[in-house]
Amino acid sequence: MSNLWDLAHIQPAGTDVLAGDTLAAMFWNGVAQRGPKVWLRQKELGIWKSWTWNQTADAVREIAGGLMALGFAPGDCASVLSSTNIEWVLADLAVLSCGGVSNGIYPTDAASQVHYLCEDSRTTVLFVEDDEQLDKALEVRSGLPLLRKIVVFDMEGLRGLSDPGVISLAALRELGRGWNAQHAGELERRVQGCRPEDVAILVYTSGTTGKPKGAMHTHAALAYTVRGYNTLISRTEDDEAMCFLPLCHIAERMGGEYFSLYTGSRLNFVENPDTVPENVREIAPTVFTAVPRVWEKFYSGVMIALKESTKLQQAAYAWSIGVGTRIAEQVLAGQPVGAGQKLQFQLARWLALDNVRKLIGIHRARFLVTGAAPISPDLVKWYLALGVPMLEVWGMTETCGAATGVPASRIKPGSIGPAASYNEVRVDPDTGEIQVRGPNVFKGYLNLPEKTAETISPDGWLHTGDVGVIDADGYLRITDRMKDIIITAGGKNITPSELENELKFSPYVTDAVVIGDARPYLTVIIMIDQENVEKYAQDHDVPFSNYASLTRAPEVQALIQAEVDRVNTRFARVEQIKKFFLLDTQLSAEDEELTPTMKLKRKLVQQKYAAQIEAMYR
């Protein structure tokens, strides 16, 4: 457990812990080095099942043998259409060990998207999770002439299936055992034949501005970057980590699977996205990486629980978080913490803060990591006041994940930190765009040389599209996306993300899109937090029959107006929000308005709700 006043001890060591210049070599070196140790854990039928490195290797060897038996050649592409689970990792490592290219597809993607991604990547083998995902694959199979076989992880509900183009994972492993027995040493030759410059994985962008683009990452870039991560957010074999974000997203692929592969930290898979809060408390990770939406949800849960607690408990929390906040402010200002304050903090932990941490499941965490989207500085301070430092990292698919990171020794809420040691970062003096250069930068977009040339300059600088500023200490702060900056009718430049982050700090707001480009004033489209707003309505006897009626209830409108008013007090009059509109439909990752990482697509939302936006300006 970290001491709030002494964060230097969680600084990374930066030592090289595993050899290998390709991911395939790195994995098999890890097996040789850590064989009987537990690496992966997953809950099955209510019981946590552990996988040692040796058990993982056996499964990967059999799957790889099955792939080779199907004619899977070096350079071929295999895609995985599944939620995050151990089978995803096994398939991924088997494909890489065969010298193939591994691609992930979001399980929320529609059949048409599955077709596009398989066609664009020239997928020859498609792994699917279950009958639901198989249905999508079968629907588009006739339009994929290169697709040789579909492999199903979970055959429940498919017992009677008889299709020569479909095989279960268990049957593929059995096929692989036989093939490996007849072709001894072939897998080792494939692993040794992988070259650092070969493309290892494709990561498709979420496609907020058009069709998804397949970012190509080489073995060299992945191995280089994963070593760099250990100088930024270090882990050891003693650490417990969680795997729950989509593995087809760069954040979990690098920060979860590959970083744990490199460091040997145990990787625990949640049951499903809905059980994350429960699983966090069970696992009690020592290092925990998540997106702002998760951190906001945890905070909201604590605030709601606090409202239901006794007056004595509320008073204990108020005093304790006050102590933590005052010490956090001193730590952030670089001021020493006195002995009396340390004793006060120990008492605050005993009274309330330890219980809050246990309620969330972060009571063993050395530090927390947030990334993939901007986060409210107040939320970073709140976690620090609990005694757990939150380190913000910034990066993108094209930088192979984190390119900057806040060091624990000097946290600056609102900043994404200085450049990571393994790449260069600069701010263009003319446009204010943040640009990145280094071996971690992707090779380019698959089948899109023109887009690649637009994105990477001849001298290697990646155009990120993010606008930012850099302070005297080299810390960067993102002010917005270049295409998202609002210029009002009065000529005022507005950064919508700052307003949106403040709104999302509310337990009643899940997401927000600020409108106002070429308009006389700012408005906002808000997606409410269904669980918390429903509870508010029930506690205050607000009648509603469904989600739409909930958003239209006058009491709920007043509740959100109060949250907007709270945010407005922090901004100048010209930057304040005058009107808002609540989305009256429940959105999930299947809906076109949301990215697979559950962020509202600004451009699409503005188009789809144009009539409601215009109504706010009448």
Image (cartoon, helix red, strand yellow):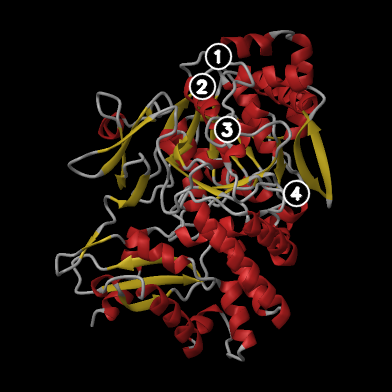
C-alpha separation, residue under disc 1 versus residue under disc 3: 30 Å
542 lies left or right of 180: left
Which is closer to the viewer, label 4 or label 2? Answer: 4
In the displayed structure, 372 sits above or below 443; it is below
Whichever of callouts 1 and 4 sits on the residue coming sooner in the sequence is 1
Which residue appears at 61% of the width and 12% of the height?
190
Whichever of callouts 4 and 3 sits on the residue coming sooner in the sequence is 3
Amino acid type, label 4: Ile
Are the two marked residues, 1 and 2, in contact with CB atoms closer than 8 angstroms?
Answer: yes
Q: What residue did someone put label 3 on?
A: 12
Neighbours of disc 4 within 10 Å: few (<14), some (14-19), many (20+): some
Percent coordinates x, y for residue 143 in the rendering: 48, 39
Percent coordinates x, y for residue 409 in the rendering: 52, 41
Are the two marked residues, 1 and 4, in contact with CB atoms closer than 8 angstroms?
Answer: no
Amino acid type, label 3: Pro
Q: What residue did someone put label 1 on?
A: 194
Kind of element beneath mark 4? helix
Q: Quadrant of residue 243?
A: top right
Whichever of callouts 1 and 3 sits on the residue coming sooner in the sequence is 3
